[in-house]
Image (cartoon, grey):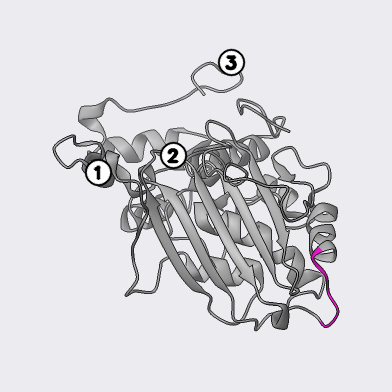
Amino acid sequence: MADRNDIELLTLPEELRRDAEERRGQILESDVAVLCLPDDAAEEVAGWVEEADTRLIDASTAHRVAEGWTYGLPELEPGQRAAIHDSKLVSNPGCYPSAFILLVRPLVDAGLLPEDAPISINALSGYSGGGNSLIGKWENPENGLDALPFEAPYALYQRHKHIPEMMKFARISAEPQFVPAVGPFRCGMRVQVPVHASMLKSGATGEQVWEALYDRYLGEQFVEVAHLQEAGALNELSYNPEVCNDSNRIQLHVAPHPSGHVLLIALLDNLGKGACGAAIQNLNLMLGFEEGAGLPNSL
């Protein structure tokens, strides 16, 4: 962003960032403000701009399913880019939901997966997704966590904050079972959605599932649908959660099972397509710039 000459970046000095009046003045001076705030602070800012010309991109969860806000996932459906371009208020998607929705929504739209399917999600994220507290915990050499070879599930006893947007924008009616985990790496993400054969439309095949994804995302800059591969053609590196790091790319895979089951897999950078990359993509659309401006590694 700092290297771009088509926008002027307004920022506050570190010592003024908690000053509400300074923050309010800076936001109302801008054409588009990108919010990286807690939910309650983001809701307060939304009130500031009601009668102003400033447009918002909100990275918090406060407005993901709120009335009057446009969901900032350009690849969601035909017309979504135009909606983002025209919107005053855009909610930046969550990292896990971006992956889940891009995997599942085309299957629901194609009639291959019913809206009430009992879906489960197994997801693995780099520890940077937990913010400064988790980064500090994992990178503190006294904890020795960086040497741990395993992933650690979390949020097992609560309804995760991403569930509402997953359901709304994937167009599913049954709440999915979501099992997130943090891994011993800073950035990267792998989201897996196992689909039992009984959940699919009668007679549906793994190839049809793959075709639904391929057809939906054909020509997309940042969404890659990997070739359908036969069993045995893959190895332990095929689904590396860090493969899309430092980019705005997301890779989608379909792994069919001989029994008719299908495993859907998405790989992305939790801080790229899962966060700041998506925000820049939305900013470009809102301002009428080329969608990939300032973003590395389009496909």
Q: Given this view, does label 3 or label 2 mark the residue nearer the observer?
A: 2
Q: Is residue 19 left or right of residue 86?
A: left
Magenta-highlighted residues: 202-206
Q: Please give the residue where the numbered disc 1 appears in the rendered image.
A: 145
- Residue 187 — which label? 2
* Identity of the residue drawn at 67% across and 39% down: 285
Badges 1 and 3: C-beta atoms under 8 Å apart? Answer: no
Displayed quadrant of residue 169: bottom right
Residue 70 visible to the viewer: no
Q: Is residue 1 visible?
A: yes
Whether residue 126 is situated above or below residue 22 in the rendered picture: below
**Which type of secondary structure does the marked residue at label 3 adopt?**
loop
Q: Position of residue 201 (x, y in %)?
A: 80, 80
In contact (CB < 8 Å): disc 1 and disc 2 = no
Picture quarter with the C terminus: top right
Q: Which residue is mark 3?
A: 5
Let me know if residue 205 is in the magenta part: yes
First of labels 3, 2 by sequence position: 3
Give, as a three-letter code, the residue at label 1: Leu
Residue 165 vs residue 13: left or right? right
Rounded to the nearest whole Å, what is the CA distance between mark 1 and mark 3?
41 Å
Q: Percent position (x, y) of residue 261?
A: 70, 72
On the image, which quarter does residue 29 sit in?
top left
Residue in front for this viewpoint, 279 or 150 = 150
Magenta region includes residue 244:
no
Q: CA distance from mark 3 to mark 2?
A: 28 Å
Q: Position of residue 269 (x, y in %)?
A: 52, 41
Q: Which is the main secondary structure of the residues drawn in magenta?
A: loop
Query: What element does badge 2 sit on?
Result: loop
